[in-house]
Amino acid sequence: MIPRNVIVVIGAGSIGQAIARRVGAGRHVLLADLREENAAAAAQTLSNAGFEVSTATVDVTSRVSVHALVEAARALGDVAGLIHAAGVSPSQASPATILRVDLYGVALALEEFGNVIARGGSGVVIASQSGHRLGALTQEQNMALAMTPADELLALPMLRPDEVKDSLHAYQLSKRANALRVMAEAVRWGKRGARVNTISPGIVITPLANDELAGPRGEGYRRMIELCPVGRAATPDEVGAVGALLMGPDGAFITGSDVLMDGGVAASWFFGELAPK
């Protein structure tokens, strides 16, 4: 029997599914989510579209849970891909929770799956354009976010509760850290013949984005949509197209990179109508 290639999707929401649709044909897609019902619903959708799918529950803030997911994936075949699309937004959680899920959780998955990713395999982490709007960090801070072992990350002085008091600040730090972490992990993954990149989307119409649009920062989000050069939000399928490029043969020379796809929000933030007064 020919071993199956397995694509692991952490976070069974709209973006994770969109990328899985582009790269999962002929492979086994393992959908993992904190909520079993989310994974089951996504699995039903993909299964009805002809994909071979199974599900798992995972808590990205628990090394035991993430390692169990790694073992479940290995039991299905060679781990050829990782799509990390799990996360919480500034309107959904406290600064501490955002740092644990969006920063530590990504670092943990990169460490664990970097130990087993197959030769020729690839990974994509969903970061955010929000990380591009964070001010410059020092080289020491960049190195700490990129290289500190995952289980020591949240003890960094720059991430202490008295330093990160706002949910948006926690989110921006987490997403900047995702891109830095992937740069560092690309070196390690490369030794296994594998690649890993981040995508930093702007506002993509998903349940998470709808929470933000309906939340206390909704006015700012609507302003970003209206004043960005493209003048609209993105769809999950557009992120899926970029994910397919990065994970597929056309992206074979791309690793350790971050693709900003935000409709020009960052451009307008620094050089246009969105610039802070």
Image (cartoon, rainbow, N blue to C red):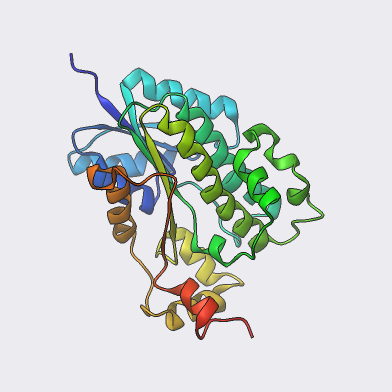
Q: Residue at x 32, y 21 (%)?
A: 76
Which quadrant of the rendered structure holds the N terminus? top left
Q: Residue furthest right?
A: 162
Q: Where is residue 134 in the image (x, y as percent from the top left)?
A: 61, 64
**Residue displayed at 33% across by 64% down:** 235
Q: Where is residue 49 in the image (x, y as percent from the top left)?
A: 19, 44
Q: Residue furthest top?
A: 1
Left or right for 251, reference 64:
left
Residue at image location 59% in from the left, 28% down from the top: 63
Which residue is more in the foreground, 57 or 243? 243
Quarter of the image with the C terminus in it: bottom right
Residue 29, percent across and down? 30, 34
- Residue 137 position in % (x across, y down): 67, 58
Q: In this view, does 39 lie above or below 95?
A: above
Tell me the residue at 55%/79% (across/down).
219
Q: Is residue 45 visible?
A: no
Residue 71 relative to residue 184: left or right:
left
| Rendered view: 271 above or below 2 | below
User: Is residue 145 rendered to the left or right of residue 78?
Assistant: right
Among the 4 quarters of the image, the one containing residue 202: bottom left
Is any atom of residue 9 visible in this view?
Answer: yes
